[in-house]
Image (tube, rainbow, N blue to C red):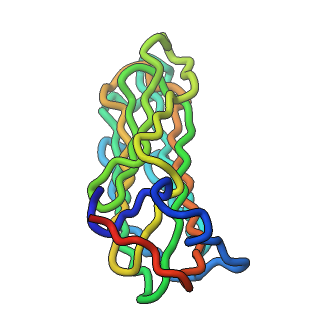
């Protein structure tokens, strides 16, 4: 277990109880997209306790589009959970893509969830992403700094038709009146 990340399945149930109102702290994302020609790429909506990251892939020439590039994007933020507080982070990945497309979310360098295009999808009709929860969720973020990184990539330049990747992050404060165990 990475320092600062505490698997929630190791905590006593009474230790961390979500509070009624979400803690509002700043989530400032930096992002970049590569291989984008016009209207595609990364769009980020931040609503305090919720962040939505949507990566829209431009159609490739074989799918009646004009983008023959490998298309990818990265969004990164470093949040600071105030001293004496903790946050639960829940991450959801959804979208449609085919072939070798890949999306992932890491917290402090640890992969939490990843999604891949369906290798059986053929042509320009995408299928739902195949999502794998690599770590238990929600993830407990102890007080201190945490770096969250979302990545998206088509990993090729063909059969990209109507592909999208979406990452939804929800932060929920926990009542830390009872000391939680610290990560090893």
Q: Is residue 11 shown above or below 93?
A: below
- Residue 117 lies in what quarter of the image? top left
Instruction: Give the number of callouts.
Output: 0
- Please tell me which residue lies in front, 141 or 24: 141
- Residue 45 lies in what quarter of the image? bottom right
Residue that sits furthest to the bottom in the current view: 83
Q: Is residue 54 shown above or below 44?
A: above
**Where is the C terminus found, in terms of image quarters?**
bottom left
Residue that sits furthest to the right in the current view: 20
- Please tell me which residue lies in front, 78 or 95: 78
Q: Position of residue 41 (x, y in %)?
A: 44, 48
For residue 76, side relative to residue 169 (left or right): left
Which residue is rendered at x = 50% and y = 28% of the image? Answer: 130
Which residue is rendered at x = 56% and y = 22% of the image? Answer: 127
- Please tell me which residue lies in front, 122 or 130: 130
Q: Position of residue 97 (x, y in %)?
A: 49, 27
Q: Position of residue 182 (x, y in %)?
A: 35, 71
Q: Is residue 86 shown above or below 29?
A: below
**Where is the N terminus found, in terms of image quarters?**
bottom left
- Please tell me which residue lies in front, 28 or 56: 28
Q: Is residue 44 shown above or below 155?
A: below
Which residue is rendered at x = 58% and y = 82% of the image? Answer: 24
Q: Position of residue 143 (x, y in %)?
A: 40, 80
């Amino acid at each position: 277990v990475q320092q600062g990340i505490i698997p929630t399945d190791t905590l006593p149930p009474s230790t961390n109880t979500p509070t009624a109102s979400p803690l509002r702290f700043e989530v400032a994302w930096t992002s970049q997209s590569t291989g984008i020609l016009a209207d595609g790429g990364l769009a980020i909506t931040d609503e305090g306790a919720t962040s939505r990251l949507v990566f829209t892939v431009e159609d490739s020439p074989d799918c009646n589009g004009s983008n023959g590039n490998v298309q990818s994007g990265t969004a990164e933020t470093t949040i600071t959970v105030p001293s004496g507080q903790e946050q639960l982070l829940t991450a959801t990945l959804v979208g449609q893509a085919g072939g070798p497309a890949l999306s992932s979310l890491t917290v402090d360098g640890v992969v939490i969830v990843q999604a891949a295009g369906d290798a059986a999808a053929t042509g320009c009709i995408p299928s739902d992403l195949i999502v794998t929860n690599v770590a238990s969720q929600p993830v407990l973020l102890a007080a201190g700094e945490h770096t969250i990184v979302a990545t998206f990539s088509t990993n090729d330049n063909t059969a990209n038709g109507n592909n999208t990747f979406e990452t939804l992050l929800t932060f929920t404060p926990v009542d830390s009146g009872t000391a939680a165990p610290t990560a090893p």
